[in-house]
Structure formats: C-alpha cells, structure tokens
Amino acid sequence: MPVLGVLVALLVLLPLGFVASYVATSSWAEIRQLVLRPRTAELLWNTSRLIAGCVLACAVLGTATAWLVERTTVPWRGLWRVLLVAPLAIPAFVNSYGWVSLLPGASGYGGALLIVTLSYFPLVYLPVGAALRGLDPALEESAFTLGRGPLRVFWGVVLPQLRPALAGGCLLVGLHLLAEFGALQMLRFPTFTVAIYEQYQSSFNGPAANMLSAVLLAYCLLLLLAELRLRRRARYARVGSGAARPAPRVRLGALTLPAVAGLALLAALSLGVPLGSLVYWLAKGTTSHVAFGPLGVAAATSLGLGATAALVTVALALPVAWLDVRRPGRLATLIERSTYFGNALPGIVVALALVTISIRVVPALYQTVPLLTAAYAILFLPRAVVGVRAALAQAPPVLDDVARSLGLSAMAGLRRVTIPLTAPGLGVGAALVFIAVVTELTATLLLAPTGTQTLATRFWASSDGLAYGEAAPYAAVMVLLSTPATYLLTRDMRRASSG
Amino acid sequence: MTALTVQGVTKSFGTTRVLHGVDLDAPARGLTAILGPSGCGKTTLLRLIAGFADPDTGTITLGEQTVFAGGRSVPPQRRRIGYVPQEGALFPHQSVAANIAFGLSRRERRSGHRLRELLDLVGLDREIAGRNPHELSGGQQQRVALARALAPEPDLVLLDEPFSALDARRRDDTRRAVAAALRAAGATAVLVTHDQAEALSMADQVAIMRDGRLVQIDRPATVYRQPRDAGIARFLGEAVLLPADVIDGKARCALGTLVVRTPSVTGPAEVLVRPEQLRLRHDGDGPTATVREISYYGHDAAVRLTLHPDGLPITARLSGTELPEPGSEVRVTVTSDVLAYPTPDTRGSRPPGEALVRHQ
C-alpha cells in the first residue's frame, strides 16, 4: 500500500515537477525573453485585479448572506439556503454565456468581475455559514456582559472566529479564478489561463505557454501560502463538549424588506439570468432546428469519459485514503496532502504538462483517452479521497478481525464486510468525480482525442461561434447533471465545517 | 484438560519488547481472566492467541492443535475461536439476526433455529433480532457480540475488555449474563481486563500481568488472599502495607503484634493488611488512631485514619451501621492473620519505614 500511495502522489505531482524542471532547465535569457515582457505584465495586472476584486466581493457577499440567513430573523431561510448554494450547479462558463448572449456588452473587467463573483460567492457563503452555525453564542454573550456593543462584538469576537472559514473560502475563489478559462475567454478578459490557452492554440508555442504556466503555478503557490499564513494561528475550539445552543437571531424589523429584496436580487442575478437565458435560447433554438443526434453523441461521450475517470480516480484514491485512515503517520499525511495539489492546479497547467510530456516521452499517448483520464484523475483526486476516506472510516479494522475469527477468509471478509460498508462512500466519491468531468472544459479541449466531442466542448464550440441557440441544450444537460453533485458537495462541506 | 496452552511467547514492536516469555494454561470450560494495568501487554497476548498477529518466539496450542510454533501460524479463520472486542464491534450494515448468524453456514443461517437458541443463551429478547446495532444499548450490543462469537461453537472465546465502555449498573448485569452464557455454552474463555473486581468476580482463574510477564496465576480467592508480592496486593484492591519485624511467625508493627500466614519470612518485612481486616473500637486494647475522613457508600464505608504515634495513614472498611465521628480517637485491631513480604529495601525498590496505601 505505501508503494501504491507514493506512486499516486508521484502521478499527481507530475505536472508540478514538469513545470519546475522546465524552468530549471531553461536558460536565464530564455526565461527573460518569455516572461519579462509587457504581455506578462498586462496578464499579471488583469489576473491580480480580477482576483482582488472578486475575492473581496465574494467575501463581503458571502459573509453578509451567511449572516443574514444564519443570524437574523429574515423570512424564508430554507429557501435562501438553497438559492445561495444553487449557483454552484451552473458552470461559470455557462453563467457567462447566459449573460453575454443576452447582453453582448457584458465584457471587460466590470463584466468579468460581476459574472465570476455571481458564480463563486457560494464558495465563501458555505463555509462561513457553517462556521456561524457552529459558533458558541456564549462567547458573544460574555462579550456583551463585558460591556461591548453589537458592532464591536461582531468585529472583535465573531469575525475572528470566522477567519479560518473565510480564508478557506477566499482561497477557493482565488484558485477557481486562476483556473477559470471558459468564462473569461467568453468575456474577452485575458488572464494567465486564457493567454496560455491562446498561446497554445494559435501558435502551438510550447516554450511560451509552458513559461506562462510556470508563472501561473507560482501565483497558485502564493495564494496557498497566503491562506496558510492567514489561518496559521487560527485554531478556534470550543472548550467542553456537547452542541452549542443555537444563537439568538438579530431582529431585522424595518430592515426585513431591504434584506429580502437584496437576497432576491442576488438570486435573480446569479440564477435567474443564466437559467432564464438558457430557457430563452432553448425555446428559440428548438424552433429553428433540433440537433438531438450530436447532443446524444456528446452526452454519451461525456458519460463514458466521466464513468471511466470516476472509476480510475476512486481506484487511485484507495491507497491514499487507506494509508491515511489505517496507517496514519508522516508518510501518509505527506501523500494525502500532495494529492490536494491537484485541486489547486489549474486544468490548463495539468493539460499542458501532460501534452508536453506525452509528446516527448510517449507520443503514442498524446490525445488519447488514457492521457485525458490521467488529467482528470490528477485534477479531481481530492474529491475521491474525501469520499473514500469517509468510507474506510466506516469499516474499522476490528471488524476484519471479527470476521476472520468467525471463520471467513480475507476475500470473504472483503466481500461480506468491507465492501458493503464502504460502497456508499466510494459511490459518493465516484459521483463527485463523474460530474466534475462532465463539466470540465480546459483540459478536455487540450487533451481529448481528435474528433471526440463532449457536452462541454460542444457547448464551447457553439457558443464561441455565437451560435447561442445551438449551445443551449448542451448547457442545459450539464446543469441538470451538476445539480445532484452540488447537493452532495455542499452536504459534505456543511458537515466538514460545522464540527 | 487444557484448552489453551501458551509457552514462552515473546513479542516486540520495533525495539519495544511487549511480552517477555509468557506461559499460560487455560483449563477447558473455565474462564481465565488476564488482569493487568493498561499497556502491560494483555491485549497483545489476546491478539496472538487469536492469530491476528504472530509471536516472535514460543508456541500456542489450542486443544490438540498447535496453532503457532516455530514461525508457522494457523490463520485466525481456521483456529475456531470466538472473539468479542471492546464495544462489541457489531457489523453496522447488518441486523442483530444477521450479525449473530454471520459465522454460520448458509443452511444454519436460513433455519433461524440457532439464532433463537443464541438469543436465549445470552438473555436477549427474541424481538430485537430484527433491529440494527445502533438501536441497541451498549449492554445489548455486547450480548449480541457474544452470541455472534458463540454461534459457530468455537473451542475458545476471547473477550477483550468487553465491559469497559458500559456504565456501572449495566456493566454488572452484562457481566453476569455473559458469565452465565459462557458457562451454559460450556465454552472455554479468556477475558482481558484491567478491572480487578471484574476479574475476581467472573473468572475461575486469574492471571496477573505486569510489564509483559504473567506474575501470578491462581484462583481468584488465592490471588486476593495470597498475592505473591506487595505490588500484586496493591493492584488487587486497597492494601495497607506496614513495615514490620517478623520473628517466629509473629510480626511486630504499628498495628501491634500480628500472626503471619507466611512462616518462611523472617526479619525486616512488610505486612499486608486489607482494610476489611481492621476493626475500630472506642475503648480496649490496640494502637490509637484519629479519624480523618469517611467516604460513605451505603453498603459500607471507607474510614481513613492517622495511626499514632508515627502518623501513618491507614484505611479501614466498615459496614455502614456503626461509624465513628471524624476527628474522634479510636482503637484499631486486626481480625485475622496477615501476609508478610521481605522488606523492599533489601531489593532496593522502595524506601523503608513508609506505609503505603493505594486506593483502587
């Protein structure tokens, strides 16, 4: 098992290692020529201001909505809890398609900021909401009795406790933005990922794309470090056991109406516009022509790739999670952490690394399903590890001992005890990977075998050519497929952060 | 007849030696308790007997079958042992009935006859057969775990601290039900525990383990009345240990001159007096002591005293009916003969002239 775990970690670290060695073997002149140029500065400026603006907006929106729903008397809380998470079911490039197809003017920094914020603010809302629910009201009550006013209590007591959740959510937003390609390309707002893709697509300029990829990777590591620093000393634990009492809610009174109006506006912008636009184009598209044939083919391709990748990724997650649960130690932690790099790596970096490696080392693998599956596995391994780890925790080793003492061989014990107990968790992990693959665009565009079209690439080809009606059915199927995964993912996040 | 024989078993984890040559015979149809503090190696010994791990050296024989010798090991599924782990470890995805029938053949599983028999044996209502493990109380879970272990009629049942997770009242009921079920099934059992009351009340034979060695193996009454050394005496219950001088079977100590049960000991020694051997009176003979505090338990009480003139602390256990007042002065007498151990200072383990009272 440890050997398998190390192999999985090596696979995941392959893109990182490739980029590092690429930079290390390039001459200084080359690096200077490719990196130190006005274009890089422009991309750096674009990427940075988008991340700064969007992270800030998401932090404010996410915290404010979480506070409204969890800590005030705002009506229809159950409804808002669903609507505030639902944007995650709409891939960002579908969201921007919804906006751009209705408002062609929605582009540039302003448009990009608005649209990615609407797509990603739930990534902050979810952990902050969970943290607010888990907060012990006794802390706030103590602060009040020590003579603090409500505002000073929020700043001095509540906000510091939200910091780990807030930092984690902001990191996710930042990493998603660094990796985002489809939405920003459609909005004609070039960031590193967009530029790398264009570089690769237009001139097939390997060195330039790889070097930009290195800069992007450095940016990712910077964000990861920043988040680590932010949460380093932020270990807040309730002393004592048992569940905290639910906190008393703030009475909104006359402010109820503006609060409801604000939440409704947010829901309309983040859900109403993309879904409405989708319905509009669906209705319009069906009157002209129905392309059920290609839709069926693309759906079948997506399902096939998703199922294959889900199977492979869960299989790769097994040794990692097994080591973490059954043989905890430094090696297990190291392996488990390294698999999380996949989550932080932009799809474009992984895809580009695999393209270059395959062309140089095993040309036969270039643009094949195995290579594409490897990219999916690297990108989505953390989702599978989470599910598999939970599954293995369901089957402690003592149950194996009992089964063997009752006369079962190791195989029979696996069949009658371990597999029945772990199957649900493995299924959840596989489902999460499956759906991520179905809506994956960047790596698929670069690595899919020639002529292979998935829902995402079909949608991309149509909407890129301004054929909005043609693109709509593909987007609709993707949204439908994403919905159950969003439910599963948010259920895990709610559980994970509320403890 | 011996159902289990362990000879010269050693086991190390890395550089740490956990078992230093353990020898144990468990008689058939009896319950042997392995009693020791946590970390003494008793659970390791149990896992070696079960076959979940292999000893470094030594042999293990179950009935006629040698299951471990010279590096050759019979896998656990072919040892015909039953195993009841801590907290039961029922299969969470299966009902009570399916759990109990887990080790049975397909035909026996279908008939249901054996299931009812086992539920009756461990004293469980037949109604609960359809429930899931999480719907049971801790005590019920332990009984189901025992029924599951007994179902394939094993030659030997191993119980690993099976009652430690239960609350006090349930623990007692469950202990008695388990002991009765084991007796009714005619099973040979080995129970691992750190609770001396559990070992003394349930077992036919108690094996005391300390630092990876079995230091005494005897019947419960014998280990309590004649512990081989002062450490075992202290581990098996409250003990008053007083420095003494033994001449001709009489020990002179702070409690007067006492008759010694161990005639071989002479010279400086340590005498063991159990708190229940002490009687307190307001007048008469015997050394005087001041009552410091009283812990009243209803059925009896522990009276802590300071012995005059040296100020040695001692504890007496009295029935709850006639108790002295705290602060009063009483006379202390010892009701029966005592045990003596050669003074530890000759063995260099503890400073002399100090009475040690350990409360378990």
Image: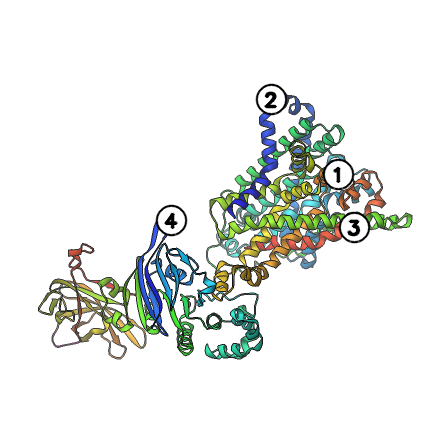
Q: Are marks 1 and 2 on the same chain?
A: yes
Q: Which of pointers 1 and 2 indicates the residue nearer the eye?
A: 2
**Mark 2 chain:** A
Mark 3 vs mark 1, CA separation in Å: 23 Å
Residue B208 seen by the camera: yes
**Residue hosting label 3:** A476
Cα–Cα span, label 1 and label 2: 39 Å
Q: Nearer the viewer, residue B119 or A478?
A: B119
Residue A412 is situated, as x and y percent measured from the top left of the image, at: 55, 62
Horizontal relation, residue B191 to residue B95: left or right: left
Mark 4 residue type: Gly
* CA separation in Å, label 2 and label 4: 49 Å
**What is the span of residues highlighted in magenta in the rendered image?**
B281-285
Residue identifier under label 2 = A27
Residue type for callout 2 = Ser
Which kind of residue does numbered mark 3 sit on? Answer: Ala
Mark 4 Cα within 10 Å, few/some/many (few <14, many 20+)? Answer: few
Q: Tag 1, which secondary structure?
A: helix
**Residue A253, x across and y down, in percent:** 66, 57
Q: Residue furthest right?
A: A288
Query: Quick check: A90 above or below B354?
Result: above
Instruction: Look at the numbered disc 2 and give the secondary structure of its residue.
Output: loop
Nearest to the eye among marks 3 and 2: give it.
2
Chain ID for label 1?
A: A
Which numbered disc flags the more N-terminal residue, 1 or 2?
Answer: 2
Q: Which residue is mark 1?
A: A111
Q: Earlier in the sequence, mark 3 or mark 2?
A: 2
The chain containing the residue under callout 3 comes to A
Which chain's residue wears label 4? B
